[in-house]
Image (cartoon, rainbow, N blue to C red):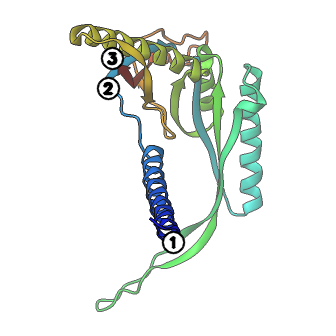
Amino acid sequence: MNTEETQKVMKWTRIVLIVLAIFLAIQALGSFRGLTYTNPVYNSISVNGEGEAVAIPDIATFSFSVSLDAKVVSDAQKQVTEKMNSILSELKAIGIEEKDIKTSDYSIWPKYSYEPTICSPTYCPPTRQREDGYTVSHSVLVKVRKTEDVGKAFALVGDKGATNLSGISFAVDDEERVLDEARAKAINDAKKKAEMLADELGVRLVRVVSYYDNIGGGPMPYYAEGMGGDMVKTSASSAPSIPIGENKVVMNVTVVYEIR
């Protein structure tokens, strides 16, 4: 083989090697991309757990209004203000703090009366409406931190001439504490179920892959159930007895375990 033929062979050899290198590089890049988007797949089991905690309510809330009529708006406002100030003063005297008394509504609207009309045998004219003063209403929301004082507060507000006394409800001030207790019980319940299931399947729990509870971003799973409870007792003979019962929180969780 002469020198010219040798050079041709070397040239084509280099070309083949370059093409082969490019091909291998493309294949390797594709493999790396495949590895990049590969998600790990676990053998897993999913279990649900439930826990509940019971707490005696330690706060109560209720609302009431003072509404009065007068020919002139300013007169009605003055009377409402005087009566409301008297009620609030009495509430503070039994230990309800300023921060726990909040106005929920203040409204003014006109009153109307209808003048009678005289009808003829063939025609009866429509009644005429005329303005006949104003109504002023002031509504307040009250929080009672001593549940034994709820009946006393009710009697006081009623005796002082409040109207629309309503909306009483009982709650636990530290709701997170009760939720934490229920959650811990739910997680423990799920763990026991997972251990039992793993034993029956002949596998081993490795780690927690995911966890979910039903609190989310919405209302917490809080269910109030009246259970009898203690009666609110006061020394005032006119004060009603208010059963406060107890509140039950139910928490559900889902736990996913990796198994081997």
Three-letter amino acid code at disc 3?
Arg
Q: Earlier in the sequence, mark 2 or mark 1?
A: 1
Task: Tell me the SS state at disc 2.
Answer: loop
Q: Residues within 10 Å of mark 3 (few under 14, many from 20)?
A: few
Q: Residue at x 38, y 21 (%)?
A: 257
Three-letter amino acid code at disc 1?
Glu
Instruction: Find disc 3 in the rendering and name its residue.
Output: 260
Q: Residue at x 26, y 13 (%)?
A: 197
Residue mark closest to the camera, 2 vs 1:
1
Task: Tell me the SS state at disc 1.
Answer: helix
Three-letter amino acid code at disc 2?
Asn
Q: Is residue 160 visible?
A: yes
- Residue 186 position in % (x across, y down): 41, 17
Instruction: Find disc 1 in the rendering and name its residue.
Output: 4
Depth check: 19 or 202 in front? 19
Task: Tell me the SS state at disc 3.
Answer: loop
In the orientation shown, which residue stands out farthest toward the front? 2
Q: Earlier in the sequence, mark 2 or mark 3?
A: 2
Q: CA distance from mark 2 to mark 3?
A: 7 Å
Q: CA distance from mark 3 to mark 1?
A: 66 Å
Q: Residues within 10 Å of mark 1 (few under 14, many from 20)?
A: few
- Residue 259 position in % (x across, y down): 34, 19
Instruction: Find disc 2 in the rendering and name its residue.
Output: 43
